[in-house]
Image: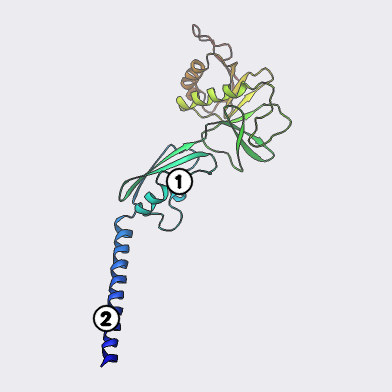
């Protein structure tokens, strides 16, 4: 009789345990289903696409679950990603997250030993890549004899990096993309647009020149030659184009 009662208790305990496991599995399934991320807003990204940013954030176990993401990134930014200072993740509702990307303030890049070396406004080399990035200009004409990561490019006139940052910002403001920026030995600047070379001269009246450039470039599409803007003045239209 005792053995029979013991067997009944064991079976009852097994049923209870199995019931609890089933309830936990059901609850887990509900959490996975109801809190699955379906909408992702990505802002501030330029170097990486929104899809690439999302894959970075949702990597790991249950990476597409808003509860897991909330626990994982609560009061914590994502760092140590090339070209990115940090990324912040916020859960807006159970199916929606917002990823805010803070990219490093890059001024441009140079080609060095088959690599693309990116530098900031102070000329410090902060990133290296095998392919160029969209939206930043390649800079040529700078003179230096060596390069060290996380140190300034050893050029004679360090103020040239502020000029590069200025022209990059203004070009972005007017939605103009240049193939590359060239500086001669006198720090005079030339912007390349296909076969059109816009000689901008020194870093003076730069925004006015680029504003004029915005209006002129469509008429030069398919042409080859030099657009002379170095002597541009606010009170005159001293701009000429010399075909090759």
Task: Indicate the position of residue 70 as horizontal and vertical percent values.
Answer: 37, 49
Quadrant the C terminus occupies: top right
- Reading the image, the residue beneath label 2 is 12
Residue at horizontal 41 percent and vertical 54 percent from the top: 63
* Crowdedness near tag 1: few (<14), some (14–19) or many (≥20) residues, C-alpha within 10 Å: some
Q: Which element is circle 2 on?
A: helix
Q: Nearer the viewer, residue 84 or 108?
A: 84
Residue at horizontal 45 percent and vertical 41 percent from the top: 87
7 with respect to 208 (left or right): left
The residue lying furthest to the right in this view is 145
* Crowdedness near tag 2: few (<14), some (14–19) or many (≥20) residues, C-alpha within 10 Å: few
Quadrant the N terminus occupies: bottom left
Q: Of the residues tagged 1 and 2, which is closer to the observer?
A: 2
- Dot 1 or dot 2: first in sequence order is 2
Q: Nearer the viewer, residue 242 or 74?
A: 74
- Reading the image, the residue beneath label 1 is 53
Q: Which element is circle 1 on?
A: helix
156 with respect to 172 (left or right): right
Residue 83 is tagged as: none
Instruction: Calculate the distance from the C-alpha at mark 1 to the C-alpha at mark 2.
Output: 50 Å
When the figure is inspected, residue 2 is found, relative to residue 35, above or below; the finding is: below
């Amino acid at each position: 009789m005792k053995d029979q009662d013991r067997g009944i208790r064991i079976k009852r305990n097994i049923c209870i345990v199995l019931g609890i496991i089933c309830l936990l599995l059901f609850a887990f399934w509900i959490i996975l289903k109801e809190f699955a991320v379906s909408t992702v807003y990505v802002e501030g990204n330029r170097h990486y696409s929104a899809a690439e940013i999302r894959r970075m954030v949702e990597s790991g176990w249950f990476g597409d679950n808003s509860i897991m993401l909330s626990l994982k990134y609560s009061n914590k930014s994502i760092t140590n990603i090339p070209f990115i200072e940090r990324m912040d993740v916020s859960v807006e509702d159970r199916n929606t997250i917002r990823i805010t990307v803070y990219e490093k303030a890059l001024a441009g890049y140079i080609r060095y030993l088959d690599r693309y070396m990116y530098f900031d406004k102070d000329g410090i080399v902060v990133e290296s890549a095998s392919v160029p990035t969209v939206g930043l200009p390649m800079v040529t004409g700078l003179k230096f004899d060596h390069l060290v990561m996380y140190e300034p490019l050893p050029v004679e006139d360090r103020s040239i990096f502020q000029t590069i940052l200025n022209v990059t910002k203004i070009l972005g403001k007017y939605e103009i993309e240049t193939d590359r920026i060239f500086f001669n030995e006198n720090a005079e600047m030339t912007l390349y647009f296909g076969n059109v070379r816009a000689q901008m001269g020194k870093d003076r009246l730069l925004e006015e020149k680029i504003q004029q450039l915005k209006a002129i470039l469509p008429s030069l599409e398919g042409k080859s030659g030099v657009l002379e803007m170095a002597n541009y003045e606010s009170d005159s239209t001293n701009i000429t184009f010399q075909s090759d």
